[in-house]
Amino acid sequence: MNISVTKRPGAARLLCAVGLTLASIAASAQATPPMDQPYGNPPPPMMNGEPGREPMPPFLHGIKLTDEQRDKVFDIMHAQVPTMRSREKELQQSRESLHKLALANEFDDLKAKLLAESGARIMAEIALMHARTDYQIYRLLTAEQRRQVTDRQTREARECGEPPRH
């Protein structure tokens, strides 16, 4: 299939959105380790890292950190791993229960609603944990490093046809 982006102005935006969605799905699929992995594994692979270096949040990609900053980022991320792992297990159990209910002989609307709400609550907690962690890490950056993060995010948004962020 050949799509001419120049003939369809919205096509570039659509292609960028589809690409970001697929990348997000791929990262999400890799982010949750299988249930049979033992507790205490390193943070999920959704964090970008360089070979021989500790994993870093994606917004730090390309930002040069001092050794002290790297140590603090590691401490922040390491501190949230047990709680994050616990929430991910709960989310997986909620999803599995909802799936089993969908394939059962009888469907219980109330039970399905409770399971769906539980899963949504856990996903919200995970999103909040990620936001808190990102905030703590962002506060470690110098003014110049923050400018670099903002500039890259603005450039990436523009490339995807998104309006500028303020």
Image (cartoon, helix red, strand yellow):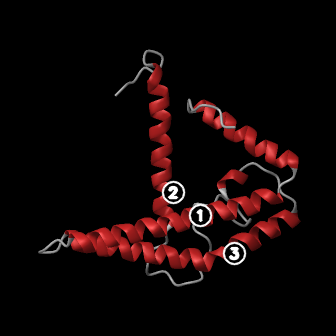
What's the residue at 83%, 57% (across, down)? 65
Q: Residues within 10 Å of mark 2 (few under 14, many from 20)?
A: some
Q: Which residue is mark 1?
A: 128
Q: Dot 2 lies on which element?
A: helix
Residue 160 vertical placement versus 75 (above, below): above
Asked whether, in this view, residue 64 is left or right of residue 90, the answer is right
Instruction: Please give the label number shown on residue 27.
Output: 2
What's the residue at 64%, 60% (across, down)? 131
Q: Dot 3 lies on which element?
A: helix
Residue 64 in sight from this viewpoint:
yes
Residue 126 vertical placement versus 16 (above, below): below
Q: Amino acid at mark 2?
A: Ala
Residue 144: image quadrant is top right
Residue 143 location (% of width, % of height):
87, 48
Nearer to the camera, 127 or 37: 127
Q: Dot 1 lies on which element?
A: helix
Q: Residues within 10 Å of mark 1 (few under 14, many from 20)?
A: few
Asked whether, in this view, residue 87 is left or right of residue 93, the answer is right
N-terminal of the pair, mark 3 or mark 2, is: 2
N-terminal of the pair, mark 1 or mark 3, is: 3
- Contact check, label 2 and label 1, Cβ < 8 Å: no
Residue 83 vertical placement versus 164 (above, below): below
Q: Amino acid at mark 3?
A: His
Residue 99 location (% of width, % of height):
27, 70
Nearer to the camera, 51 or 66: 66
Residue 165: image quadrant is top right
